[in-house]
Amino acid sequence: MSTVMNTGFLPLELLRIIFALICAIVIVFGNAVVMGYLERKLAGRFQRRPGPMEVGWHGILQLAVDGVKLVGKQLIIPKQTDRVLYRLAPIISFAPAIMPMVVIPFAPKLQGRDFDIGLIFILAVVAINVLAILIAGWSSNNKYSLLGAMRSVAQNVAYEIPMLLTLLSVILVTGTFSLRGIVEAQSGGAWFIFFMPVAFLIFFAATLAETNRAPFDLPEAESELTAGFMTEFSGMGFSLFFMAEYTYMFIACSLTVILFLGGWSGPPLPYGEYTSALWFFAKVYALLLTMIWIRWTFPRVRFDQLLNFCWKYLVPFSLVHLLVTAVVLKL
Amino acid sequence: MKDYFALIFTGGKSLIVGMMITLRELFRPVVTVQYPREKLPLSPNYRGHTILIRDEEKPEKHRCISCKMCERECPSNCIDLAGEKREGVKGMVLIKYRLDFTKCSLCGTCVEVCPPNALDFSKVYQHVGFSREDFHYDLLAMVEEDK
């Protein structure tokens, strides 16, 4: 993308932004389809069921058919809801999910834009999702929705602290918030997971809670709250939440890969400046599969257990970790 | 304080044990049967609705002699049969054998009591119908159609 093209009608920078946005949207939708299929297929296999089998070879077109169904469904708005907020909530949840794609470095030359504060940008944008969930729960006029939303807010606020503290440990080492800078600091196989495995575990546990994944899926706890904050949503309202959830999982795993697993680094490939995105995606999907694996292994935690785990284990350990990192760097 | 750190190790170990169990299950074969396409073998003891069985020596005929023992013994009164005397034929000829399967409890008394062993349980288990009358089976028609 750095080569200068003779574009008479559009400035190069604008073309680049448009191309990056198209790629971002393709990744968001593609990831939702792939993850939706993998989740259902693996859920089946973990329980020794075949999973989706009917549409296409081994049910591979199931998500396409589901998409058509969801687009065709009526968007039902229950009585006595806050109609404006109710319609706005899925959009507020989904729109910020696309923005972090712009700063994620997939490969040395595949990055929409490198911000000096890329990491802070992602964290800030992703935090909007909590607001969307609260709006969705509040405007639905349904006690399950509201309970789910309240739980989500409490959980996200609590788990943001250990997450940010472990991030600080990494930032202390790299000295930059630029995602590209963080990846380049780990070049040559010096991935941060080898130097601070505890931080990796804390960060991964916190991202599980941040993305409302099992065993921390209290906001949507299907056995207690039907579907939590998205109970009342149908059709595209539901599917926007669904896609947003998978996109936030993708972003969380991308961040984990960038911060701890060396981003795009891996054995050299031809045209490595572009194709090393393969290593990036391989690592991200390995983490996403681990998330699915965890979901189908562990039972949901109780709310007090959730907060105890955060305040009694994750926060003290990440504080100690930050202190140790600072001391080691100073020595 | 000792418990605090002990819990990290016991808890962490139990998490790994759990993950290994599900990982093992992931690679084991699927146990569900894709029902309409695959079917499990039926137990030989399965009791479907009763049917008239054909004579082994004369396979074109059933063995019923219209003695009405089954009709009399049936605790649910779900059998309705009739026979008639015909010129040149020894014994009675069965002209009607109707089974009201909505009432039948599959107790098997009719099968046990039948003197010529003309009745047996079928292996039919997919009964579908839109009305009550769809389950009033005409066993005589069945045995004749089945030729």
Image (cartoon, rainbow, N blue to C red):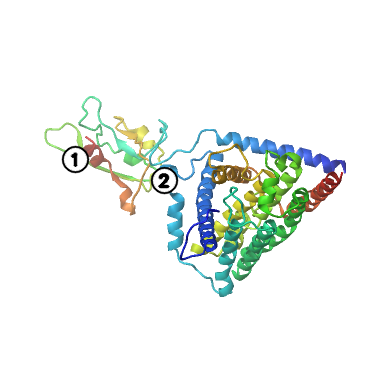
Q: Which residue is mark 1?
A: B84
* For residue A10, above or below residue A23: below
Horizontal side of residue B137 vs A15, given as left or right: left
Q: Are marks 1 and 2 on the same chain?
A: no
Q: Which residue is mark 2?
A: A54
Q: Quadrant of the C terminus of chain A?
A: top right
Query: What type is the residue that disc 2 sits on?
Result: Glu
For mark 1, name the chain.
B
Horizontal side of residue B144 vs A218, given as left or right: left
Secondary structure type for disc 2? loop
The reply to whether residue A81 is in sight is no
Q: In front: A311, or B57?
A: A311
Q: In front: B18, or B76?
A: B18
For mark 2, name the chain.
A
Secondary structure type for disc 1? strand
Horizontal side of residue B141 vs B78, given as left or right: left
Spot occupied by residue A135 in the image (x, y as percentages of width and height): 63, 68
Q: How many marks?
A: 2
Query: What type is the residue that disc 1 sits on?
Result: Glu
Q: Residue A157 is drawn in which quadrant?
A: bottom right
Spot occupied by residue B27 in the image (x, y as percentages of width and height): 55, 34
Badge 2: how crowded within 10 Å, few (<14), some, or many (20+)? few
Spot occupied by residue A273 in the image (x, y as percentages of width and height): 57, 45
* For residue A195, above or below residue A12: above
Q: Residue at x 54, y 33 (%)?
A: B28
Q: Residue at x 33, y 33 (%)?
A: B120
